[in-house]
Amino acid sequence: MLRIVSLSSSTGFLCVAAAVLSCGQIYGQDYRTGIVWQEPKVITPGATAADPPSDAIVLFNGKDLANWENGENWTVKDGVIYAGRRPITTKEKFGDCQLHIEWSAPEEVKGDGQGRGNSGIFLMGIYEIQVLDSYDNPTYFDGQAGAIYKQTPPMVNAMRKPGEWNTYDILWTAPRFNEDGSLRSPAYITAIHNGAVILNHFELLGDTPFNRPPQYTKHEEVGPISLQDHGNPVRFRNIWARPMVAPIGEQVREPFIRNGDKETPINQ
Ligand code: MG
């Protein structure tokens, strides 16, 4: 018999014990979900969390705007994108996805409020998370950097100085629509700005125009990512995205407790 109490009760010990014996052998019984899971795909992570994992779609790698529509009206110089005329839009379309993007407000500070370092990232081409020079630049809070425009401010202002690089890491859950056009489930966004969470599973109320309330209008299950032209030479670099697919499992039987050879359904 294994005498846990005579040894350490640390989780470290339990892990070692579990590696030798199953939990059921240690504790007498164990819980089985009845779900058969598919093995999660093995990927190779990037060298740092800012580098694309092996399954990422690289949208800008420092060279050109071949993966974007209207790229001819923006500029690539020294490995970075400078905002130009009209938005650029990815040729690739995404539903639920993870997006990494780095951006910098112009080093030369011009204008104020919404007129200073303004751009934006439009998920599915419709829903804007604000890009703005919000370093010591007052404006309405639900329009500052990291806001879902006119819906919510970010939780904190994690802005770096003009000319320095900011990162957004975004988790996007696309809205779902019914056949008749009604909303089945809203969009959600989680965003991290320079390592600080600014939006935590925020439920969007709809799209993000400046001149009317948000609303949902049925659209495709996938859509492009757009970068806004707001007349300011905001810079972008290192842009990649990964479609997010939930783990796949099949409930092949009811959950049960196994104790030796005995199986007891949970719900009886
Ligand atoms: Mg904007």
Image (tube, helix red, strand yellow):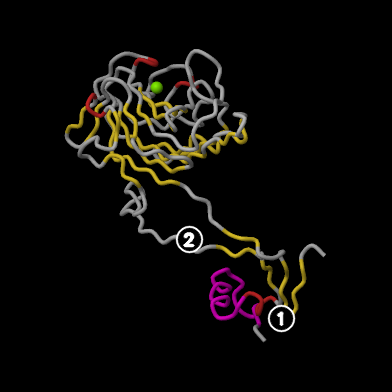
Element on which disc 2 rests: loop
For the residues marked 2 and 1, what is the alpha-carbon distance in whole angstroms?
29 Å
Q: Main secondary structure of the magenta part?
A: helix
* 48 and 85: which is toward the camera: 85
Q: Callout 2 environment at 10 Å: few (<14), some (14 to 19), or many (20+)? A: few
Residue beneath disc 1: 260
Q: Quadrant of residue 159?
A: top left
Q: Is residue 18 magenta?
A: yes
Q: Is residue 206 left or right of residue 69?
A: right
Closer to us: 63 or 235: 63
Q: Which residues are magenta?
A: 3-22
Please indicate whether residue 172 sits to the left or right of residue 258 in the image: left
**Residue placed furthest toward the front:** 179
If you read the primary sequence from the N terminus, does the residue marked by circle 2 or circle 1 appear first?
2
Residue at x 22%, y 40% (from the top left corner): 62
Q: Which residue does the numbered mark 2 point to in the structure image?
A: 40
Quadrant assignment for the N terminus: bottom right
Residue 259 vs 55, above or below: the answer is: below
Mark 2 and mark 1 in contact? Answer it, CB < 8 Å: no
Task: Name the outermost residue toward the left.
Answer: 78
| Labels 2, 1: front one | 2
Q: Is residue 145 magenta?
A: no
Residue 29 shown left or right of residue 219 in the figure: right
Residue at point 44%, 16% (across, down): 139
Q: Position of residue 4 (x, y in %)?
A: 64, 78
Q: How many marks?
A: 2
Between 64 and 146, the one nearer to me in the picture: 64
